[in-house]
Image (spheres, coloured by chain):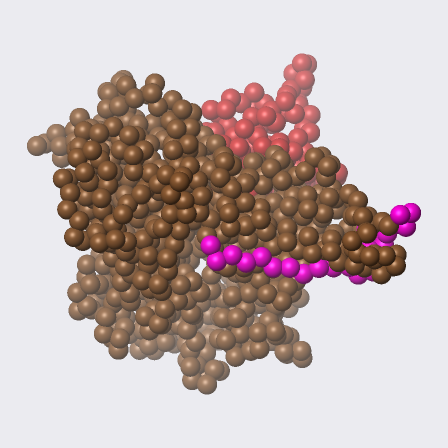
């Protein structure tokens, strides 16, 4: 089936079998391999991407369901040069070891801080508890996300925050 | 930071992070090769049975399917013989009859055992085809646990006549004849759980018929060992196989051992002349990657009235699953050898037996045998201290190995005969520091108290961590023409921060900025021989190999420069930045690179390193629900010389939280019929960000290891080792008024609640 959506700001058109998940479409048809798949049943959060502003498990969504949407992956969170404020905070806080779960944490945290730039540690912990990490024990991840909040702060006029 | 300040010991952010943060890393499933086909494994759903036939006709006829291979096809290709997967660690002749074949032939012995491999244009098509395979398997009675196994009535290997591959004995003094004022025997058990890495296993194999070369992407942990086994099983010369290490999403002992797929995927590629990819799904990962930890123990302690331990004796039974796999000997051997942990015990006799059952085969998982031994021993010590009326801290303190006793002999293992010594340390210091940082004296008054409807409990325990195993490691350092320095190592990266550590060591010893160092690791194409990453060895051995080779490189630079300068090698000065000079004559690193200056080196040590420490926990228990909340956890570990405090702490905290998963949540459960009950992350629960928010740790470097020039000790496993004992003792402390002894893991709410209810019904 033919699917068209905006991927990291660029329009893409892809022909996939109807049963193709969004994660497989991104990884194996569009070759955006930054999105990782670790359980294929929606529990671990590694495959999280942002669809129309919401953090979504791309292993539980069919590619055809993304038709007409705006999809952002970890590649789309990455600036042309260097790291985003959130990525840099992960680096600073040693919030990753093997790094396999990291793209899912970045997309989930980005969606959270975009909506709730003042999220408390408790709130960050609650939202990120939907993502599994086997290496870090999470503490540095929570610290990294908390420390990156200023990059998402909304300007005083109440407009949308500028992201990193 | 400049080389002058030194990099070793500095808080250094990781060099591997950028790719991982930006989605540009390359894991096994990220590899796409031209003409690549996809494999799916057809697995047994029967835990124990005789294979009558496997009908692959329909599957083969499906469009998009290129081949289906069964055990018969493998045998046909390899002179009638289906290869077995040998033990890599601690092999002894007793294990050989119980090794697993690369694919099932006459029998299946666990749910998930490979029966066929399907190769198709896509994974989805291969899965469709696998669903069309019909395996006619005559079910046999099942061996669900070690007790049934021990009866030897139902045999996994009929021709061998026993389900019991081996009994290890760890011995010291004459434990069986020791008598003392206090003798206490207790039963403990730990449940089956394992590493469960976030990235599942995955391989891409590609066979080039013209050159007769096999290339396998996705190698991990021990690529050189895997290459040897693959060569032997495929009847290929070792040199014709390249194992390529790409990014690896976590190891913890499980990933990178030789599994059936490590044969089946390359085999299929050779048969079809096309690249073949296989990526394990999560069900397969939970079913078929090595399990671990399932042990039962009867342990007896003999003490003086004053609490001095005279002897430790008992038996451990490991439920080893269906086969002896590459690392399957390690948990039962380790639990015996390390039962005494950090304590000075003159008389030890531990018998540890492996029993085969119709479950997934076991192997090493972070702290193999040590996590279990610590749970058994620390629980028994807590019971003994309590019954003798001795403060549990003072009980431990009086029995710790003292610094003047170093090196200190542990119990000697019999198969193979292996004496073992603790290398260095002052165990009192880590205990005292742990008590201080944890706030033991302030929290003591909470012990057993019911506050706001919850019982409070605290506990402290002491531990050792073994590291630096595996005898040797190699490195080669080359200076490039642009003055960059490439360091090739046999060590492998599993996500633990290897590149950063080795970059720090190389930059320090060569006096160049870290940016000028590139580490090339793991793949067999880089080195003639390498040993890999296991047994917390990559800093101690791999790092020392880099250090040694860097010194050799400086000698080589002096020699090469002396020839150019026409002076004595000893007159050549090497300045920071790797510039060689003699008087006014100068050769820059770039010049030296053009002269192809390079060095090879090796570091070997037959002695293990022993990091050590103490950990304390504060828990509350809700008697209404049985839910245990971890209020605080503090670990202190002396890990010898610290290369990078940032990654050392990462190992520590990460290890603790993995251990907490094993204590509270994780259970690779089977029913009594051998059916697997934990096939998804909804069934197999692992810690999440909200479960254990309060974990703290300190790493010390008071006692460098005498066994390597860095003074480093392995530190990848110390975090996990003490968790079971410490947390269970805190729960025992909380419920002391009810006299509840949590001797069985996991400490799930239902188990705690049932124990509380049973007490209140009495």
Which residue occupies 25% across, 53% down? B173
Q: Is residue B202 left or right of residue B147?
A: right
Which residue occupies 40% across, 40% down? B404
Is residue B214 among what the camera can see? yes
- Decide which of B95, A19 is in the foreground and name it: B95
Which residue occupies 28% across, 65% down? B166
Which residue occupies 52% across, 70% down? B228
Query: Which residue ends up furthest to the right in the rendered image?
Result: B584
Q: Position of residue B339 (x, y in %)?
A: 30, 48
- Decide which of B420, B469 is in the foreground and name it: B420
Q: Quadrant of residue B96?
A: bottom left
Q: Position of residue B231 (x, y in %)?
A: 53, 74
Q: Is residue B220 above or below residue B714?
A: below
- Decide which of B709, B677 is in the foreground and name it: B709
Is residue A50 among what the camera can see? no
Residues drawn in magenta: B583-607
Quadrant containing the C terminus of chain B in the rendered view: top left
Q: Is residue A26 left or right of residue B437?
A: right
Quadrant containing the N terminus of chain B in the rendered view: top right
Please tell me whether residue B587 belongs to the stretch shown in magenta.
yes
Q: Position of residue B313 (x, y in %)?
A: 22, 50
Q: Quadrant of residue A156?
A: top right
The number of discs equals: 0
Which chain is rendered red in the image? Answer: A
Q: Position of residue B257 (x, y in %)?
A: 47, 61
Q: Is residue B370 left or right of residue A99?
A: left
Query: Which residue ends up furthest to the top in the rendered image?
Result: A156
Q: Quadrant of residue B691?
A: top left
Query: Which residue ends up furthest to the bottom in the rendered image?
Result: B79
Colour chosen for chain B: brown
Q: Is residue A47 left or right of residue B475?
A: left
């Amino acid at each position: 089936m033919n699917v068209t959506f905006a991927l990291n700001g660029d329009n893409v058109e892809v022909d996939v079998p109807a049963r193709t998940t969004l994660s497989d479409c991104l990884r194996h048809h569009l070759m955006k391999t930054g999105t990782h798949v670790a359980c294929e049943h929606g529990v671990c959060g590694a495959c999280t991407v942002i669809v129309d502003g919401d953090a979504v498990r791309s292993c539980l969504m069919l590619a055809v369901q993304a038709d007409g949407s705006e999809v952002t992956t970890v590649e789309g969170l990455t600036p042309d040069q260097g790291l985003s404020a959130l990525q840099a905070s992960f680096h600073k806080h040693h919030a990753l070891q093997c790094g396999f779960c990291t793209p899912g944490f970045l997309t989930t945290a980005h969606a959270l801080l975009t909506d709730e730039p003042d999220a408390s540690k408790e709130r960050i912990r609650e939202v990120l508890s939907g993502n599994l990490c086997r290496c870090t024990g999470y503490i540095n991840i929570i610290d990294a996300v908390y420390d990156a909040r200023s990059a998402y702060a909304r300007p005083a006029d109440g407009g949308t925050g500028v992201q990193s | 930071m400049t080389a002058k300040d030194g990099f070793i010991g500095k808080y250094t952010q990781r060099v591997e992070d950028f790719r991982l943060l930006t989605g540009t890393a390359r894991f096994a499933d990220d590899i796409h090769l031209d003409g690549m086909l996809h494999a799916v494994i057809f697995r047994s759903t029967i835990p124990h049975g005789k294979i009558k036939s496997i009908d692959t006709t329909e599957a083969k006829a499906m469009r998009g399917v290129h081949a289906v291979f069964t055990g018969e096809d493998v045998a046909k290709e390899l002179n009638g013989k289906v290869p077995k997967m040998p033990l890599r660690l601690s092999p002894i002749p007793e294990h050989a009859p119980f090794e697993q074949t690369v694919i099932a032939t006459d029998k299946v012995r666990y749910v998930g055992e490979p029966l066929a491999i399907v190769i198709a244009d896509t994974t989805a098509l291969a899965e469709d085809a696998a669903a069309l395979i019909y395996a006619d398997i005559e079910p046999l009675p099942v061996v669900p646990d070690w007790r049934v196994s021990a009866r030897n009535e139902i045999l996994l290997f009929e021709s061998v006549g026993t389900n019991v591959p081996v009994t290890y004995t760890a011995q010291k003094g004459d434990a069986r004849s020791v008598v003392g004022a206090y003798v206490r025997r207790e039963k403990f058990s730990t449940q089956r759980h394992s590493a469960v890495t976030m990235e599942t296993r995955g391989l891409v194999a590609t066979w080039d018929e013209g050159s007769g070369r096999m290339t396998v992407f996705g190698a991990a942990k021990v690529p050189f060992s895997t290459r040897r086994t693959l060569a032997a099983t495929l009847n290929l010369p070792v040199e014709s196989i390249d194992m390529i290490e790409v990014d690896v999403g976590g190891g913890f002992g499980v990933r990178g051992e030789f599994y059936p797929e490590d044969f089946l995927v390359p085999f299929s590629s050779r048969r079809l002349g096309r690249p073949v990819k296989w990526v394990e799904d999560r069900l397969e990962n939970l079913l078929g990657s090595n399990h671990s930890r399932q042990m039962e123990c009867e342990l007896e302690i003999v003490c003086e009235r004053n609490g001095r331990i005279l002897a430790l004796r008992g038996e451990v039974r490991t439920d080893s699953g269906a086969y002896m796999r590459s690392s399957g000997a390690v948990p039962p051997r380790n639990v015996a050898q390390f039962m005494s942990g950090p304590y000075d015990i003159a008389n030890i006799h531990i018998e540890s037996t492996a029993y085969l059952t119709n479950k997934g085969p076991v192997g090493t998982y972070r702290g193999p045998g040590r996590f279990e031994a610590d749970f058994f021993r620390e629980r028994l010590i807590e019971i003994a201290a309590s019954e003798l009326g001795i403060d549990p801290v003072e009980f431990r303190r009086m029995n710790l190995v003292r610094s003047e006793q170093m090196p200190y002999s542990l119990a000697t293992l019999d198969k193979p005969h292996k004496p073992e010594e603790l290398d260095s340390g002052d165990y009192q210091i880590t205990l005292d520091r742990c008590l201080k940082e944890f706030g033991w004296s302030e929290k003591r008054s909470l012990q057993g108290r019911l506050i706001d409807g919850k019982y409070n409990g605290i506990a402290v325990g002491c531990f050792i961590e073994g590291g630096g195993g595996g005898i040797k490691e190699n490195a080669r350092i080359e200076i490039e023409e642009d003055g960059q320095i490439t360091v090739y190592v046999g060590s492998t990266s599993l996500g633990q921060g290897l590149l950063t550590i080795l970059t720090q060591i190389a930059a320090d010893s060569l006096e160049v900025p870290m940016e000028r160092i590139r580490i090339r690791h793991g793949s067999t194409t880089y080195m003639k021989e390498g040993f890999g990453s296991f047994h917390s060895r990559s800093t101690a051995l791999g790092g020392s190999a880099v250090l040694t080779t860097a010194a050799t490189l400086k000698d080589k630079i002096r020699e090469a420069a002396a020839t150019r300068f026409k002076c004595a090698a000893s007159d050549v000065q090497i300045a920071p930045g790797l510039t060689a000079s003699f008087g006014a004559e100068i050769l820059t690193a770039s010049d030296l690179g053009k002269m192809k200056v390079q060095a090879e080196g090796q570091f070997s040590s037959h002695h293990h390193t022993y990091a050590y420490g103490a950990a304390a926990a504060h828990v509350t228990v809700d008697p209404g629900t049985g839910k245990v909340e971890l209020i605080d956890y503090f670990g202190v570990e002396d890990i010898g010389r610290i290369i990078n405090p940032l990654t050392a702490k990462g190992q520590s905290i990460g290890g603790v939280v993995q251990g907490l998963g094993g204590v509270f949540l994780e259970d690779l459960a089977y029913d009594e019929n051998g059916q697997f009950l934990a096939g998804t992350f909804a069934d197999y629960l692992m810690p999440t960000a909200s479960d254990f928010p309060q974990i703290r740790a300190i790493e010390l470097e008071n006692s460098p290891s005498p066994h390597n020039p860095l003074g480093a000790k392995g530190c990848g496993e110390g975090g996990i080792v003490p968790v079971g004992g410490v947390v269970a003792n805190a729960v025992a402390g909380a419920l002391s008024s009810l006299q509840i002894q949590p001797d069985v893991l996991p400490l799930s709410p239902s188990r705690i609640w049932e124990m509380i209810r049973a007490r209140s019904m009495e």
